[in-house]
Amino acid sequence: MTLQLTPLHPLFAAEVHGLDLRITPNPDTCNAIHRAMDRYAVLLFRDQRIDDDQQMDFGAALGPLEETLGIVDAHKHRLKHRQMADISNLDTDGHLLADDDRRRMFNLGNRLWHSDSSFKLVPALYSMLHARLVPPENGDTEFADMRLAWEALPNRTRETLQPLVAEHSLLFSRAQLGFGDYTEAERAQFAPVPQRLVRWHPGSQRHSLYLSAHIGRIQGWPNPEALALIRDLTESATQRPSVYAHRWQQFDLVIWDNRTTMHRGRPFEDKTHPRDMRRVTLTDHAPTLEQAQAAG
Ligand code: OGA
Ligand code: MN
């Protein structure tokens, strides 16, 4: 099986044609999707009129799903499946979240460049985001390829970065926006986890820079030096020529590989327009510190 692909950007990201995801793909098709993900890191499937069950089935066909979500007020979950992340500005009754709702404040963290679930010991593999309802304008999602980011670095910098271990937490990313309103249970649940700063991606045989807004420390480094470095790296990794900005149409499904990309949401009129996006997320196989760091 070969997929029909059209590149969306000169360096990565492609649109897949000819698949109807209401039908769960067979192993051969899944394999072709994995190979395309290895090459392009971001895939777009347009006009997929799938429901929650079909989106879950599609995810499960590609790999094991993440069990838990990194959210506040988990008891107010709007969607039928506990494993489906609600990337919307809607309350359980379908109304827009109130301006000062804690969930709205917390969700604004998605506007920072990040890799999904890098705050979990076993982080996310693919994220699969489906657009059920999109605002008339704005609200793009931007992607940057972290293999290109690594390859653009001078050798001396690469040698410095290679052995480093960063600590990631939702508390760190939200603190960047001045959010710190947690229950004790949430604070404990969001305790920092260690991740390699440089990862090896076996599917493309390339390294990637594992950056995320969730990073708040580098082990063995003073905080200001660590965070100044992370800020510089993030800035250079997300320069315009390495960014694909996805302009959403209703029923788009976009899959990205969190090992090799970062992404961020862009602002839209969220106090007046609903934006209903739902995400199924695959889990990686092991903590990054237990993963191989190069071919071999
Ligand atoms: C996500 C995410 C950004 C957006 O779904 O993980 O960060 O544009 N989304 O909704
Ligand atoms: Mn995200």
Image: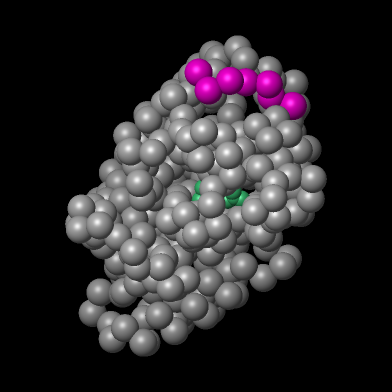
Foreground pick, 30 / 131: 131
Q: Is residue 35 magenta?
A: no
Judging depth in this view, the residue of 236 and 191 nearest the camera is 191
User: Residue at the spot x=65%, y=32% of the render?
Assistant: 132
Compared with residue 156, is residue 142 higher up or lower down, i.e. above or below?
Answer: above
Q: In this view, does 46 lie to the left or right of 207?
A: right
Residue 132 vertical position relative to residue 165 in the rendered view, above or below: above
Q: At which x and y percent is residue 189?
A: 23, 52
Q: Where is residue 185 in the image (x, y as percent from the top left)?
A: 20, 53
Quarter location, residue 167: bottom left
**Can residue 135 be seen at all in this image of the molecule?**
yes
Q: Residue 42: which quarter of the image?
A: top right
Q: Where is residue 92 in the image (x, y as percent from the top left)?
A: 48, 35
Q: In this rendering, would 123 be left or right of 44?
A: left
**Image point 37% across, 87% down: which residue?**
225
Q: In which quarter of the image is residue 263?
A: bottom right
- The region drawn magenta spans 47-53
Magenta segment includes 49? yes
Residue in view at x 55 percent, y 15 percent: 24
Q: Give the residue drawn at x 69%, y 56%.
A: 268
Residue 293 in the figure: left or right of residue 58: left
How many marks the image carries: the answer is 0
